[in-house]
């Protein structure tokens, strides 16, 4: 909101230029706030990192460089062998900027604080440049530019939000109980889980039914448990089993 209240001239020229970055939607959010047009040609190294590692992440979750939750610039640098600032150091600098904003903390000269912030940002620029030269030989440039163009609608979506059909949303919320009940009945009829009990629009989970289902399948030793020793239905605990068994994916 502060940026949108101040007029800044766009210093960039778009003719014969390609804008290269990592997670460009974040940069475009500033362009949009300042009222600048978004560049027509852009290459997002975040997309290229994902494009080259998505399938590998699915096949080999034990490989440290392709963990599906490691998608930041430092993780891409790790994967492609680029020297970088540690994740802990980056978080420390980011927290410092979030806490103090444009003004130096107490007992720190403003000029020193500004040099520190600019120095931190410049390290990201140098990391991104080095990453680009590492990734370049492995990419199809035309396809990379097409993928990079998606960063523009992502930025607009993040600014404007996702349009919702308010009437349909209200209808779904009003009938939520019936929807859950019918879904539970359908799944129980198809898979015979014995996990959910349906009374009218109320759906409850049966711990005894879940235990019986797991024992029928012979999964007692591989099913994750809660700290209290009960069988867990937490989504993040069941991901590995869901890759192996169709019934677990449905649950």
Image (cartoon, rainbow, N blue to C red):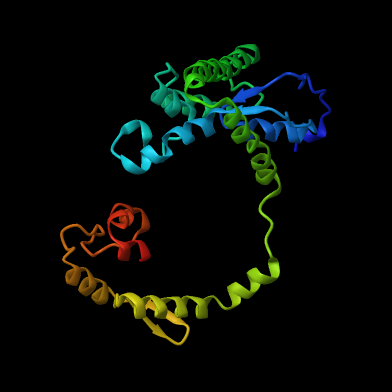
Rendering coords of residue 32 (x, y %): 75, 35
Give residue 155's quadrant in the image: top right
* Residue 155 visible to the viewer: yes
Instruction: Tell me the quarter of the image containing the N terminus.
Output: top right
Instruction: Tell me the quarter of the image containing the C terminus.
Output: bottom left
Give residue 150's quadrant in the image: top right
Q: Is residue 73 above or below residue 123?
A: below
At horizontal 18% and vertical 63% (from top left) the residue drawn is 219
At horizontal 78% and vertical 19% (from top left) the residue drawn is 11
Rendering coords of residue 14 (x, y %): 76, 22
Which residue is at the far bottom? Answer: 200
* Left or right: 121 as drawn, with respect to 75: right
At horizontal 75% and vertical 35% (from top left) the residue drawn is 33
Looking at this view, is 210 or 244 the one in front?
Answer: 244
* Left or right: 229 as drawn, with respect to 189: left
* Left or right: 167 as drawn, with respect to 224: right
Rendering coords of residue 216 (x, y %): 18, 72
* Residue 2 visible to the viewer: no
Looking at this view, is 63 or 8 the one in front?
Answer: 63
């Amino acid at each position: 909101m502060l940026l949108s209240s101040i007029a800044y001239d766009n210093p960039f020229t778009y003719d014969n230029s390609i804008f290269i970055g990592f997670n460009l939607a974040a940069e475009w959010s500033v362009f949009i706030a300042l009222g600048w047009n978004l560049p027509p040609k852009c290459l997002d190294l975040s997309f290229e990192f994902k494009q080259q590692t998505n399938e590998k992440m699915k096949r080999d979750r034990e490989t440290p460089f392709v963990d599906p939750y490691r998608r930041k610039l430092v993780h891409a640098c790790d994967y492609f062998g680029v020297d970088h600032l540690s994740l802990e150091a980056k978080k420390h600098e980011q927290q410092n900027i979030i806490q103090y904003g444009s003004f130096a903390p107490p007992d720190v000269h403003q000029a020193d604080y500004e040099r520190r912030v600019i120095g931190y940002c410049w390290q990201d620029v140098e990391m991104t440049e080095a990453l680009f030269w590492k990734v370049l030989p492995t990419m199809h440039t035309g396809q990379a530019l097409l993928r990079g163009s998606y960063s523009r609608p992502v930025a607009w979506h993040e600014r404007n939000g996702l349009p919702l059909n308010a009437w349909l949303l209200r209808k779904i919320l009003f009938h939520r109980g019936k929807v859950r009940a019918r879904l539970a009945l359908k799944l129980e009829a198809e898979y015979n889980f014995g996990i959910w009990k349906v009374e009218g629009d109320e759906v409850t989970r049966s711990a005894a039914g879940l235990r019986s289902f797991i024992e029928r399948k012979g999964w007692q030793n591989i099913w994750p448990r809660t700290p209290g020793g009960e069988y867990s239905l937490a989504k993040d605990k069941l991901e590995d089993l869901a890759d192996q068994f169709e019934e677990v994916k449905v649950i």
